[in-house]
């Protein structure tokens, strides 16, 4: 796995990772036990009886909140459909909970610990592949700088939680890395896995198809050869999951119906825009900030970086914003690695330093929110 990096390259990545890992988790334990907080009021649907602060010096349990419950439920009990208008776990893709279940044999059945370790491992792998991608395809950029911008992004704590962010980042980076190296079989395999880890994984097909056609000089006759076939592994992963829904629950499109009941309606969800409390107002302001930042980033990614990066970021943003809510937008853009390449390419150091200050402060805020069982995305 590491054979394409020298010792001088791999050691700094390990140092950065373990420094971030140690500081982030010590900080998390301190802030969990420092505050006496009431239940969150950032969304009207949050039930104070279900989501409240629980102080603990246990460094494992603080990594499991909100969607973590659903991944752990799948890992323990498999998929289930609760019926019309009810929340079901079938909107969560299978690869991550499957890995948790397998890895739990090494953690004596502790599923939360298994998920936390897996997320940490995949984050480290992500940093290694990110370094290599920058080194080979963006030699003008210090390869450590995008890694730093990634790790200080406001919602970066999710890389350290029982969530799919680390896994998906690793798989999407590997997909792009091998696609850019024209190793389309490996790109297709990693892309297939990405599309089994979250719904936006299928979108990797389109930037990879662009890179493939670009490699063929957009010559239709030249592009129609067996080398293109592995790219179709990517959407096949998503189709496989939907086909499982058909076999078990009798509905190929059940995913979209349950998403609707989760509040992602593919039309404006007015309940998610109710500014009924100060926390709701702040939450909305931060979501608007993330949307604005991502749109500005998108413009410069298209202008300054690879066109395929722009396709990937654009399609991911469209998928997130088409659901009628801004909820979780800060987490969804967390895995869009071209953003950190763009930030690292900016020549104005004062801008980079200012962004770093802002990003670190927001990272602290979102970490405090998450570990205290407040909504953080």
Image (tube, grey):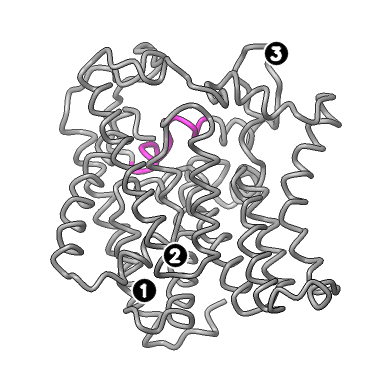
| Dot placed on the residue nearer the N-terminal end, 1 or 3 | 1
Mark 3 crowdedness (10 Å alpha carbons): few <14, some 14-19, many ≥20: few
Q: Eyeballing the image, is 242 above or below 325? A: below
Q: Return the x and y of residue 36 as percentages of the image width and height.
A: 17, 23
User: Quick one: 286 or 28, which is closer to the camera?
Assistant: 286
Q: CA distance from mark 3 to mark 2?
A: 39 Å
Magenta residues span 59-69
Residue that label 3 marks: 83
Q: Nearer the viewer, residue 102 or 44?
A: 44
Provide the secondary structure element on which disc 1 rests. Answer: helix
User: Is residue 63 inside the magenta stretch?
Assistant: yes
Q: Say which residue appears at 25% left-offset and 42% top-offset.
A: 29
Are the residues flagged by discs 2 and 1 in contact, CB closer than 8 Å? yes
Residue 154 vertical placement versus 220 (above, below): above
Residue ID at (73%, 26%)? 254
Name the side, left or right, on which 279 lies relative to 271.
left
For the residues labelled 1 and 3, say whether their Cβ atoms are less than 8 Å apart: no
Residue placed under numbered mark 1 in the picture = 13
Query: Which residue lies under the disc numbered 2?
Result: 124
Question: Within the image, what quadrant is residue 241 found in?
Answer: top right
In-image side of 239 versus 108 (left or right): right
Q: Quadrant where the C terminus lies?
A: top left
In front: label 3 or label 2: 3
**Residue 192 at x, y percent in the picture:** 70, 56
Quick one: label 1, few (<14), some, or many (20+) residues within 10 Å?
Answer: some
Q: Which residue is painted at 45% across and 28% down in the image?
A: 325
**Residue 123 location in percent, x, y?**
45, 59
Q: Residue at x 28, y 33 (%)?
A: 369
Alpha carbons under labels 1 and 3: distance apart: 47 Å
Residue 132 painted magenta: no
126 or 282: nearer the viewer = 282
């Amino acid at each position: 796995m590491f054979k394409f990096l020298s010792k001088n390259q791999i050691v700094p990545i390990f140092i950065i990772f373990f420094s971030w890992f140690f500081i982030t988790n010590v900080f998390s334990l301190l802030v969990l036990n420092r505050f006496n907080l009431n239940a969150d009021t950032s969304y009207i649907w949050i039930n104070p009886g279900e989501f409240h602060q629980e102080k603990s010096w246990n460094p494992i349990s603080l990594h499991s909140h909100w969607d973590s419950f659903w991944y752990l439920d799948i890992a323990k009990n498999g998929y289930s459909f609760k019926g019309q208008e009810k929340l079901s776990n079938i909107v969560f893709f299978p690869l991550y909970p499957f890995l948790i279940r397998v890895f739990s044999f090494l953690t004596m059945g502790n599923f939360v610990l298994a998920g936390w370790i897996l997320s940490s491992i995949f984050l480290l792998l992500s940093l290694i592949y990110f370094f290599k991608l920058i080194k080979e395809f963006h030699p003008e950029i210090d390869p450590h700088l995008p890694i730093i911008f990634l790790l200080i992004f406001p919602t970066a704590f999710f890389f350290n939680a029982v969530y799919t962010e680390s896994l998906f980042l690793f798989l999407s980076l590997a997909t792009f890395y091998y696609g850019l190296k024209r190793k389309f079989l490996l790109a297709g395999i990693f892309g297939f896995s990405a599309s089994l880890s979250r719904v936006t994984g299928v979108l990797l097909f389109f930037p990879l198809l662009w890179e493939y056609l670009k490699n063929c000089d957009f010559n239709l006759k030249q592009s129609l050869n067996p080398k293109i076939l592995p790219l179709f592994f990517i959407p096949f992963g998503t189709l496989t999951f939907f086909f499982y829904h058909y076999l078990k629950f009798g509905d190929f499109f059940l995913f979209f119906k349950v998403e609707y009941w989760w509040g992602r309606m593919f039309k404006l969800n007015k309940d998610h825009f109710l500014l009924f409390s100060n926390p709701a107002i702040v939450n909305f302001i931060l979501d608007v900030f993330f949307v604005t930042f991502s749109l500005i980033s998108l413009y410069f990614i298209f202008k300054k970086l690879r066109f395929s990066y722009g396709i990937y970021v654009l399609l991911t943003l469209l998928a997130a914003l088409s659901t009628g809510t801004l909820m979780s937008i800060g987490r969804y853009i967390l895995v869009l690695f071209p953003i950190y390449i763009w930030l690292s390419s900016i020549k104005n150091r004062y801008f980079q330093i200012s962004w770093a200050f802002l990003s670190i402060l927001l990272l602290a805020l979102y970490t405090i929110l998450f570990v205290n069982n407040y909504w953080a995305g």
